[in-house]
Amino acid sequence: MPRVYNWQLGREMLYPYQERHPRRQFAFVFNINRCIGCQTCTMACKSTWTFARGQEYMWWNNVESKPYGGYPQFWDQKLLALLERANPGGQVWNLRRQDGERSPYGVFEGKTIFEAISEEQNEEGETFQETSGRVLGYLPSDQEWEAPNIYEDTPRRPENHRHLPWGGVGESLPAHQTWFFHLQRICNHCTYPGCLAACPRQAIYKRQEDGVVLIDQERCRGYRKCVEGCPYKKSMYRGTTRTSEKCIACYPRLEGRDSVITPDGVPIETRCMAACVGKIRMQGLVKIARDGAWAPDPENPIYYMVKEEKVALPLYPQFGTEPNGYYIPPRWVPLDYLTQMFGPEAERAVEAYVCPSRRMLALLQLFRVSQRIIFGFKLVEGKKIAESEATLLNGKKKTLEIFNDTVIGYDSKGREIVQLTVEEPVFERSPEHYNSI
Amino acid sequence: MREQPKTRQGREKELEADDPLALVMTPVSGGDLQLMATCLIEEFARMGLKEAEILALFRQPIYQTHALYRAWGEGRVRELVRQVLARTGRTCVSVTVLPHSGGDDA
Ligand code: SF4
Ligand code: SF4
């Protein structure tokens, strides 16, 4: 099997195809801290792409509440368990081998879904490489796909809904008393897609112009190897067409070719991004160098957050697909959980977010101010106007300086899209706290 | 007298681990609900939300944060919102979106 370089793992890894990279890559940053779980993104996608017969259970965008939710149910626990079984105790990171851009998170010394396959055996005792498997995965059952947010609703009738005729019988059921956060999930348009690697028909391809991963519906014969091979379970089978389908990154919007939405031809963010009520999503296109590294572009918001501030991290990088979705981890969640989900830099990322640099604080304001993709941003510095406080992971407080800065966003043609100026924070003191600063 | 059924029926049956529709959850140790609520309120304050708007995100049953509201009651949540806002203030920004020849579709 060829060897390819995966910078998220800080090392080369096995992959069924030779390394080849697009010119630009579709990528996004989700700020988990601000998601309210309203599912507007989910419905924006559903009403655009998956409202037809045979697509009923498909949610290309879904938002699940961790730690107990998942769509399909238990997708990540199952994958982690498969990897652990294939390599017991060996799924570890070596932090001593951190080396700039080549291995910013250290080196992952465990096995990816492409590497663990040679260890995993079927019931007859054959390894998957001796059979047809190329990727360690599993096919979720129909029930696992059936109810995207099962167990996430409260079993009790809310106190302020006493007038409703229903709901009186659930009150004795236990309610979740645990921390939670909402995890927003779409296809990661991975650099080394598991779906593509698993497809026996070579029906899946990655576009040169933007790295979007698509399934050629003409070639697809519905073998569902991609459903099995995608560790994030973002390729889905459609019974009515007998082919698999997946998120297409709203490519007509991304190409800037939709004459109604974008007559001036600039790339527009996907439906799920543009609809986000919580203003947690930012999407972009990053420049890719010939060797697959991200070409330096510190004015690009996505590049800046992932590469310079390292405030946004990939989801389960240890799976090995080099996903292009990045997350600002939730700041209240136990660290061991975050480390398993986002890799060993989770703690540092949370710190970088809670007490952001001046430039990062300004960039956070640019989330969801326009549906035009922001290709560059600039900071115009103003005076210090106030101090505020932020709560750290350990519960301690830290002072945050607020500046009267202006941040400007630019589109793909270098034209100004938006300007934002931070004004003095407003303190509205209730009588009990009028003197509390 | 009616004869009792010999086997348990429907919902009376014991939980079976391989039943995909059984009510389950994944308990994960650690975590601090007070810290979580404080952080969430700080986040909304940084986005410029007012006291009543933040409280609404706890009061509305459709949001997960409602679990805290139910467990703690309105008084405790409101008090926490006030305490956090008094410490952090809420960040305000002025936004100028430059004209765009396209539509405003989301
Ligand atoms: S997330 Fe899954 S479906 Fe999307 S590119 Fe990666 S492996 Fe393929
Ligand atoms: S629209 Fe935004 S805030 Fe609402 S669930 Fe989706 S990601 Fe979260």
Image (spheres, rainbow, N blue to C red):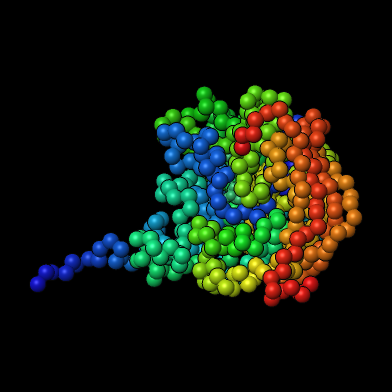
| Up-down relation of residue A106 to residue A200 (above or below) | below
**In the current view of this chain or complex, which residue is farthest to the left?**
B1
The residue sitting at 48% across, 53% down in the picture is A149
| Up-down relation of residue B9 to residue A114 (above or below) | below
Q: In terms of depth relative to the viewer, which is nearer, A229 or A360?
A: A360
Question: x%, y% of residue B77?
Answer: 59, 70
Q: In terms of image quadrants, where is residue A88?
A: bottom right
Residue A85 seen by the camera: no
Question: x%, y% of residue A70?
Answer: 52, 53
Q: Is residue B49 left or right of residue B9?
A: right
The residue sitting at 59% across, 55% down in the picture is A36
Residue B97 seen by the camera: yes
Quadrant observed for ligand 1 in the rendered image: top right
How many numbered badges does the structure rendering display? 0
The residue sitting at 66% across, 60% down in the picture is B50
Q: Quadrant of the C terminus of chain B?
A: top right
Q: Quadrant of the N terminus of chain B?
A: bottom left
The residue sitting at 54% across, 68% down in the picture is B69
Q: Is residue A409 left or right of residue A134?
A: right
Q: In terms of image quadrants, where is residue B30?
A: bottom right
Q: Is residue B74 left or right of residue A282?
A: left
| Up-down relation of residue A257 to residue A340 (above or below) | above
Q: In terms of depth relative to the viewer, which is nearer, B75 or A184?
A: B75
Q: Is residue A121 left or right of residue B80?
A: left
Question: x%, y% of residue A418?
Answer: 77, 39
Question: x%, y% of residue A69?
Answer: 52, 56
